[in-house]
Image (cartoon, coloured by chain):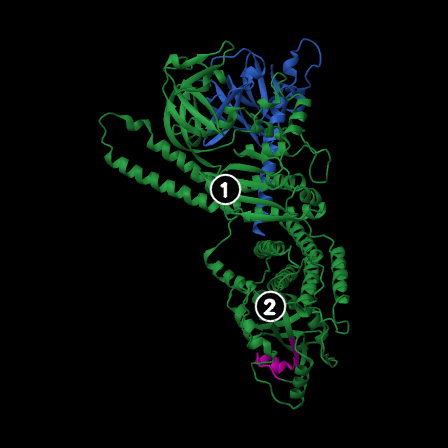
Chain colours: A blue, B green
Amino acid sequence: MGETSDLKKRDQAASSEQDAQKGKYMTFKSGNEFFGLEIQYVNEIIKFQSVTAIPETEDYIKGLINLRGKVIPVIDVRLRFKQPPLEYNDRTCIIVINVKSMIVGLIVEKIAEVVEIKDENILPPPTFGRADKVQNKYVYGIGKVGDTVKLLLDPDKLLNDEDLSVVESAADMMIDED
Amino acid sequence: MAEEFSTDGMLDIYLFENEQLLEQLQERVLEQKDADCFDEDSINEIFRTMHTIKGSSGIMMFDNITAVSHKLEDVFYYLRESHPDNVPHLQLVEHVLEVEDFISGEMDKIRNGEPVDGDASSIVADLDKFLNQIKSGGQKAGEEAPPENIHEEPKQFYIAPVATSDSRFYKIYITFYPETEMANVHAYKVVYALKEIAEDLLYSPEDIIADENSADTIIKEGFRILLQAQCTEEQIREIIGVGYDIKAVDVYECKAEEFLQGFDFGDQDEVKIDLNSSVEEIENKAEAAEGKEAEPAKPKITPGDFVIKSKEPGKAKTLAKDKKTDKASYISVNVKKMDQLMELIGELVISESVVLQSPDLNVPGLSLDNFHKAAAQLSKVSTDLQDVIMSMRMVPLTNTFQKMNRIVFDVSRKLGKDIEFVMVGEHTEVDKNIIEHISDPLMHIVRNSVDHGIESKEERLESGKPEKGKVTLSAKTEAGKVWISVEDDGKGLDREKILAKARRQGLLDDNKPDSAYSDREVYQFITLPGFSTNEQVTEYSGRGVGMDVVIQNIQAIGGTLEIESTAGLGSTMSLKIPLTLAIIDGIVMETGNSSFVMETGVIKEFIRVREEMMIHEPNGDEYIMIRGEAYPVLRLGKWYGLEEYEESVEKGIMLIIEVEDKKVCLLVDKLIGEREIVVKPIPPYIGKVKGLSGCTQLGDGSIALILDATGLVE
């Protein structure tokens, strides 16, 4: 009995936590733009650490890092956005995100801040015009914060977009085999 | 007294015990499947097994399992009592296996928390039919079938006088069958059932849940209950539910004063439901009651066989004994906890190397004698710890092999082939994780052997072989690997057919004649997707999916498959599988800025070479002559397109790697040393990279990639 009530409490705690997180976005800078990630996906932010490269993978998959004994893959967001690579420095951070219980690190140039963006301030991305097509795939909305805009990212698409399909199906196969 | 009747722990025990019982049952049945009939021992054992399963399922209220096991028990009761000699043995075997399958299926449902809703009626009906069939075919037509052993109507009946007051007082005396296991739980079940109607309830022995010894007391002295309730004796009897476990129930009605006196059972108003004692005994007792002979306070009302009957020798009995010692020496542990422990020990090994190789120790002039002593001690303990956890995870292959036995039986029956199945070395122990992975591939291989390895009876006779085919499943450990092979004496693989098909599918080099392919290479073709030389698709094989899946599964755990075959004489498929997946001995090396690990076992030697030993082909392939032998050279840095790796073969070091007789020289920059490596999977997000089997954490916290020798050689 004790266990179920504990579970319930935890559920409630989780949902209230989710409420508190709603509308909050972790923003970071990549190139000239600021991007936003819904904060519920973000596990933690760590300093850049050395990455073990994995051969024969997409160039934006930088390799593996050791996160307190857990081996997680990291991807370079700049490369993912087809932006020219930038030398890593002491401002470079890794945002560890958890998408559908897949833990992946995102290497970003610079962490900005956590901002609150109300739903009414989020516009759908322009469907045509000059907007860079490549970026549009991961950007599901444009959030207005004061005078600035943040491009809101869909982390699922960021990790698993079409051009990842090969990798993904390979991963699926591996899971199937298990 | 335990107020809550929690079934969780009991459910686990129920599943665990029944699973084992079913495994033993299957083993025994399959052992004797080729005999003309079951021997006495087996009949007894199957009977007892069913009895036990029925009993425990009854407690857990899985009615369908109870019903099925009860029916099968009936069948074997008849076999045991009447010894009919014209039982269709194979049919019987199939019935037993069918029941076993059904119960296993239901138990799976229980395990997964699904409702236990399997429909037992068709199996019960089948068994009924079967029982009738053997009964009617019985040699003595006049003889009555023995009484059904369980749900028998009471032979004597007592109709209670109508009560004047609402509340009535009863003394109840329950006798259990002496072989009933966990009689205290059975007793508690009764108490639990009576609670629903009871206004007041007392029982003796009192501490039936916590005290395990009470089971013996209950068996020896019976179980006594004082009940105050508004119901008739009929209702009580209904609630207590005389059955498989309860031998007799005595219900005495008494007055309130007597009730208050406690456990002093008198002889008045005796109602006895006696199931197994003969009519004479019951009559005797009735006479005794008439003669107003007071029965002793501790009634010896049980029929003769109850008191003196010595324990029969037999498997079930020894089993019961074993179980008692089990309590002291075994505990079952959640596999998750074991995995966690395994992981922690892995972390410990890593932390240990972090400490022992700490750069802080490299200060010159530091006296480290004591440190090194302590470090050696620590290493020893952690190695021992690893060995222990490994041995805890080791499970014999027996169950897996039994499953194969079953498959051979099923498939050969369906295909009308007569096959002898031999198991060798089934006690070989393998890591539990690995067992899970090899079960399916092995099943495929065994099926293949039976289906298209072994020929039909006619073909066998024609080619001068014994009519009965033979499939041998064997296991052994050698050099840190487990070898599991499936050998059949069938027709073997048809080299020509495979080659023809391979050529049709464009798998062969057009310029190469057939004869240029070694048998080994040819046989490897059957492991490619969509490759089946069996023209006829049967229920079991021939679709060409299968061998490729087998290969994939085996490779996933770092194993390999070897195929040997002689046309006309049979073929052997051997799986070579690592004993364990989690911790391996490996050589750490560096190339460019990356660290790699290679399993120690596949490295034949390290060698420094000179430039003039190299042979360069115009197309870029390189070979090296070492002691008169040419090995292909693989530059790890170039292979993976790394940066800043050593170009010169003289500065780097060569590793000669041998996998399945294929040798390759691997050029790396430098060696770091031998380490115990905790294997971690590469995150699925990355996908599969050729030549890598996992990754690991090194002493300095950095990550090294584990090279998969098999992948490199290919």
The residue that appears at 70% across and 43% down in the rendered structure is B456
Return the residue at label 2. Answer: B187
Q: x, y (%) of residue A100? A: 60, 31
Q: Quadrant of residue B608?
A: top left
Question: Which of these two is toward me, B144 or B486?
Answer: B486
Please tell me whether residue B255 belongs to the stretch shown in magenta: yes
The residue that appears at 56% across and 29% down in the rendered structure is B520
Question: Which of these two is toward me, B712 or A170?
Answer: B712
First in sequence: mark 2 or mark 1?
A: 2
What is the magenta range? B249-266
Vertical placement of residue B36 versus B203, above or below: above
Which amino acid type corresponds to the residue marked 2 in the rendered image? Ala
Q: Under tag 2, what secondary structure?
A: helix
Q: x, y (%) of residue B187? A: 60, 68
Q: Is residue B448 left or right of residue B640?
A: right
Q: Which mark is residue B339?
A: 1
The residue that appears at 52% across and 36% down in the rendered structure is B576
Q: x, y (%) of residue A17? A: 58, 35
Q: Do tags 2 and 1 sit on the same chain?
A: yes
State the CA–CA distance, disc 2 to disc 1: 38 Å
